[in-house]
Image (cartoon, grey):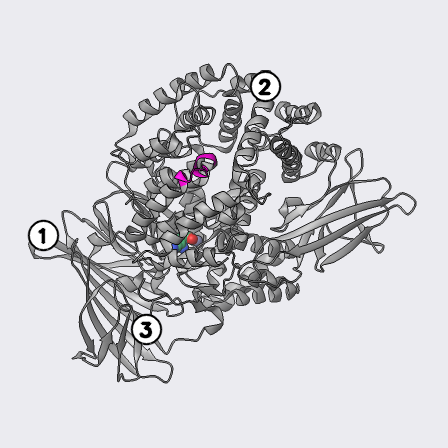
Amino acid sequence: MSQQPQAKYRKDYTSPEFTITNIDLTFDLFDEETKVTAVSTVVKQGASSTLILDGEHMDLISVHVDGNKWSQYEVTKTQLHIHELPDQFELTLVTNINPSANTALEGLYKSGGAFCTQCEAEGFRRITYFLDRPDVLAKYTTTVIADQRENPYLLSNGNRIDSGDLEGGRHWVKWSDPHPKPSYLFAVVAGQFDVLRDQYITKSGRKVDLEIFVDQGNLDRAPHAMTSLINAMKWDEGRFGLEYDLDIYMIVAVDFFNMGAMENKGLNVFNSKYVLANDQTATDTDYLGIEAVIGHEYFHNWTGNRITCRDWFQLSLKEGLTVFRDQEFSSDLGSRAVNRINNVRIIRGPQFAEDASPMSHPIRPDKVIEMNNFYTLTVYEKGSEVIRMIHTLLGEDSFQKGMKLYVERHDGTAATCDDFVAAMEDGSGVDLTQFRLWYSQSGTPLVKANTSYNADEKTFVLELEQVTEPTLDQPQKQALHIPMNVELYASNGAVIPLYIDGKSVDNVLDFKQSSQRFVFENVQEKPVPSLLREFSAPVKFEYDYSDSDLMFLMVKATNEFARWDAGQNLIAKYLRNNIEFYQSKQELVFPQSVLDAFKGILLSEKLEPAFIAEMLTLPSQNEVAGWFKPVDVDAISEVLGFMKKAIAAELVDELTAIYHSLNQDAYIVDHPSIGKRALRNVCLSYLATTDDGENLVKAQYQSANNMTDTMAAMNAANQAQLDCREVMMNSFSDKWSHDGLVMDKWFMLQGTNPAKDALTNIKQTMSHPAFSLKNPNRTRSLVGAFFNQNPVNFHAVDGSGYRFASEILVTLNESNPQVASRMIDPLLKYRQFDEVRQDLIRTELEKLSQLENLAKDLYEKITKALEA
Ligand code: B3K
Ligand code: ZN
């Protein structure tokens, strides 16, 4: 690489020398040469008379200042410097861009037949030269011109204010967005779509037109997205008192998209995966994912758009908060416990892994080379946990007071994480001084607990210790303010009230020092403690629970999450033991008492099926891998397989009975029905490993009237490597090969195929007509699944998986650096493995680091990994 990419630091923030208050854009759309005319009102704010604009991958045609041709400028690879400028002026820039050649899917590009844009974080600078930073808020007017027949719909942000026809079969539409916004929220779409329309009346009576644009022929897959949108609008009014502010809300589904969706003001652009669903094409998980993402993007209208980020280091200000909001939305509409369980799985699995990797960073990063690399689980999911901790410390009422104050203070501005915390403090009166460290400190704290009971004094002592290991980005760590949610139980299951120093105390303890002692008084018998209830802080937690305590909690804990967590702890104990046994070639064990505890859960008539399904789901290979260093991939896989078979063999009669009893004739998408299917399909995944597995799986595939059950059968066959796998895979591909989105499910099965020859097969699959490395969804489904969810084959000790990864990354580095950078993550964690694998991976990373045209996305990650 010719020039080394430069890092930016949070501490270096300065306000812009100029700002842009208004911009009038005209797009003359053509596939290979689109002319963009940008007329901006520029106002000087600092001392300099040179305006420096960001811009790349385009041709500058002309520069005018106040209508006069301007020649005092120079263009670099990434900037335009314009000199000798007055204090306020109108700047007219004409640029040419090539949407067809844009495979990076940032800026203006073609997705299938349609034009669309993606500007966050820094894609607007591929459209025109601009102050492409989130603290420059301008009012946008946009005129879109294109061929009428190919692009009957011409869309942009705000309200449609005018339109007309032109010669040569072209037409135009003009849009105006009254809300000043940063450039990253700008969007243009042009194409031919089918439109699903509805209307929403806000609580103050504003009529809002709702429009969802999908590829022609897909209208029957849009209603669930519309229902989710309406539910989200209603929910935000009810829970947060926040109402929509334009007369129209549009969502466009596109097939080529780097991530899930984008919250552009009034014109969301979505990956079609998060819009399109009907019973034949989508699983229950897809339906729930759509609800969550539609909600998430809608909630950004306040937390992100009306109040945006001052700079990109503050990304978690909008993302952590909006993830928290979408999690609450899903929990209020569905099962709170199941949602919490799934969110905690993400933190304990991939987020903890990210914290332990060379990419570790605080939720508010300090140093960034490529901003796209920081749309991470840490910023999003841990960011949401930080908001959740504030919610835990304040309670709902005070949290909402803080939110209200935050909106009052910062509406229409670009704010910081500190602004948010200050509003929460001022709105609630709760001191968050030490808590702020969660924003600046990276890594996962380890909390260790010890307890003792004094029968004479009737006291129960809880001793807590916290330590955060140094991370690559930060050698020194401090003690954090950890909300520790605790409950104590008497042997009959009664909750013991908590008293400290003679006073009744709340369940949530303020754990603020490196080590801290809590003495609970008036405890009449040795209690069973339930600790870190609700996963009240994103920490690794160690406490030496006995088996009997855990079995007690599985049944008696007052909240479902704690019961699930006790079950997971119990499984974790035997996973760890068995991994040791496996490594020392001893026999693997699974005690009868533990199996009985799970039998009790399975047969419980009091518990919801959705919850039982979670209780019976073993932790993922990746989560378990996070407990060890070095990671023994084969041992983990063998032991997980052993435990699955042991449960199946012991509970085969019960699993079979429940499997049959949960059969539903009609496919209904509501939470009780989803829960029943979830449990039934968990039963099937166990039963697939038993003698009757082949028959049950085959029968389910043949009789399924919906995609959830079809996929469950295929997944079971894939994981258990049943003979029927092949036939099912062929029949599925015959039926769906015309539909990439549905084929993603099939590609995922190929990617995760545990068979020894999976890699050969995956390479052949890449020439399947429905596959393309140009499409991020296809790439993630096949190749991404192999990298992340096929541990034994990916980490094959002959290095074949790593070499394949490296070949793919070379291609993606050229075509789509953002996707390449997502895909490289498993290689960054090479130090977790044994020496042989470390060497193999390092060799590939070194090769990649030598690439001539290494994009800064990969450069940033590889450099960190190699210097680690
Ligand atoms: N804000 C977008 C993510 C943009 C990612 C840019 N690489 C979607 C979201 O979080 O809602
Ligand atoms: Zn978001």
Q: Which mark is residue 169?
A: 1
How many marks overall?
Answer: 3
Residue lying at the far right of the rendered structure: 456
Q: Secondary structure at mark 3?
A: strand
Residue lying at the far left of the rendered structure: 168
Left or right: where 631 falls relative to 794:
right
Q: Residue at x 41, y 49 (%)?
A: 843
Q: Which residues are magenta?
A: 792-801
Query: Residue 380, position in %: x, y?
Result: 49, 53
Under mark 2, the amino acid is Ala
Under mark 1, the amino acid is Gly
Indicate whether residue 794 is drawn in magenta: yes
Under mark 3, the amino acid is Ile
Front residue of 420/402: it is 420
Query: Which residue position holds label 2?
Result: 649
* Vertical placement of residue 272 versus 856, above or below: above
Asked if one can make out residue 818 in the rendered structure from this viewpoint, the answer is yes
Query: Residue 23, position in %: x, y?
Result: 27, 69
